[in-house]
Amino acid sequence: MERVKKIIALKNSPGAVRYLKNTSLLLGEKVFRMVTGLFVSIWVARYLGPEQFGLLSYAQSFVALFAVVTTLGLDGIIVRELVKNDSQKQREELLGTAFLLRLITSIVVLVVLTVVVFLQSNDYETNLLVVVIGSTVLFQSFNVIDFYFQSKVLSKYVVYSNLISLILSSLIKISLILNNASLIAFAYVILFDSLILMLGLIFYYLQNKLKISSWTFNLKLAKILIKDSWPLIISSIVVTIYMKIDIIMLKELLGEQQVGLYSASSRISELWYFIPVIVTSSFFPAILNAKNTSTELYNNRVKNLYRLLIWAAIILSIFVNIVAHDLIAFLYGTGYEGSSQILIVQIWSSIFIALMMVSNKWLLAENKTKFIFVRGTVGAVINVILNYIYIPIYGVQAAAYTSLITLIFSSLVIDLFTPTTRKHLLIKLAAFVPLYRKI
């Protein structure tokens, strides 16, 4: 009875209540952003057509390959240190050092990006799109303010900033469509979006009676942060290559129109990714608690989480395969008919995305984060090789098939190569059998 009272008191504590409100607000913002973003993205795609939409998607993917470096893998590290060190001096040193590191890196990356893109055989419009969208990295240096709000469980200010930028940029995109704007105008909206988000973060930071002018740079601290974050930088680069390289290779091997078809179907298939993120984040604390209680209970809970997401993804994939042609026709209209065949393949990747997400959580619980990096690196290499071989032969659908094959390898086959993951593979395979209890 006493234990129950303590649990109730803990759940009703101000800190717990604020955490729950903060989490609910973040979840609501993500759902709103997902729905609004999809609606506006489809409208933009219909207006631009496959070729110009493909060019815009290519420019965004090309920038992403460079922009990932500017984060320096500092996000989680800065939040962790801000939680540990609550003094004003330490806060200003952490934020100031992280900001200057990111700003310098952003400037270097933007210069390198500009040089690289103009050395390619692209036309002027493509190069201009990449440089304009690439300029967003300068404004993103102020995202260190987000880290502060996270550490104080005050993400509502980040949510407000995101919503303001999302609503404004969405309204501007709709206005551009109604006024027959050119492609480059949509690139400037992406840049404007980053600017508004930056101004929003600065505004709410100042509203909390804090000063950016008080930030200081500490060289010793900078060296410590980089030493801690470099593995995360490499991991982020690998993941970005894994996620974006298909768009880059499609543009180089087949052209902008095929990129447009592929990007249109990806907008639909990637909607699913939101579900595993929420489910794994919600259920995994209970799984971690079970780890300290019973190995059997721990393994069963992991298996049941796999089963829940695997079968949800299977049902979704079957449904999408049935309605794919009508869905693409309804959402994107004429010109995107080829996207339905790509979507039919892409949606089956949702099963193995779910496996990867749960597996990543399990590897974190088992303190085997190196395997996450190795798996991502091997997957990226395989994906590039398969794309290079098969896209010229089989066209745009080959990119969807190679991504699916790579995910199957990364989520299942690679587990055979170490004893621990080999044993865990049995749990994954058992989850494919509905209501099967034994591991």
Image (cartoon, rainbow, N blue to C red):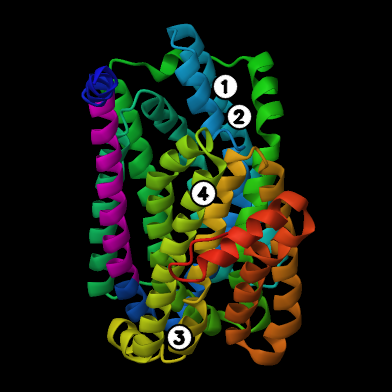
Residue at the image position 54 percent from the left and 49 percent from the top: 299
Mark 4 vs mark 3, CA separation in Å: 30 Å
x then y, percent, for residue 254? 63, 84
Q: Nearer the viewer, mark 1 or mark 3?
A: 3
**Would you name the residue on which mark 2 appears?**
101
User: Distance of mark 1 from mark 2, alpha carbons?
Assistant: 6 Å
The quadrant of the image that shows the N terminus is top left
Q: x%, y% of residue 426?
A: 63, 61
| Magenta-drawn stretch, dominant element (helix, strand or loop) | helix
Amino acid at circle 1: Thr
- Of labels 2 and 3, earlier in sequence is 2
For label 3, count other residues whose C-alpha is less than 10 Å away and answer few (under 14), some (14-19) or many (20+). many
Mark positioned earlier in the residue sequence (1 or 3)? 1
Contact between labelled residues 2 and 1, with CB atoms less than 8 Å apart: yes
In the rendered view, does 343 fall on the left or right side of 155?
A: right
Residue 325 % position (x, y): 37, 91
Using the numbered discs, state the Cα–Cα distance from disc 1 to disc 3 in whole angstroms.
46 Å
Is residue 199 shown above or below 404? above
**SS class, disc 2:** helix
Find disc 1 in the rendering and name its residue: 97
Q: Quadrant of the C terminus?
A: bottom right
Compared to 286, does 95 lie above or below? Answer: above
Q: Which class describes the residues within 10 Å of circle 1: few (<14), some (14-19), or many (20+)?
A: many
Eye-nearest disc, 2 or 4: 2
Instruction: Name which residue lies at 71% across and 59% down.
Output: 415
Q: Horizontally, is 284 left or right of 158 in the view? A: right
Of badges 2 and 3, the one in the foreground is: 3
Residue on which the image places disc 3:
339
Secondary structure of the residue carrying numbered label 4: loop
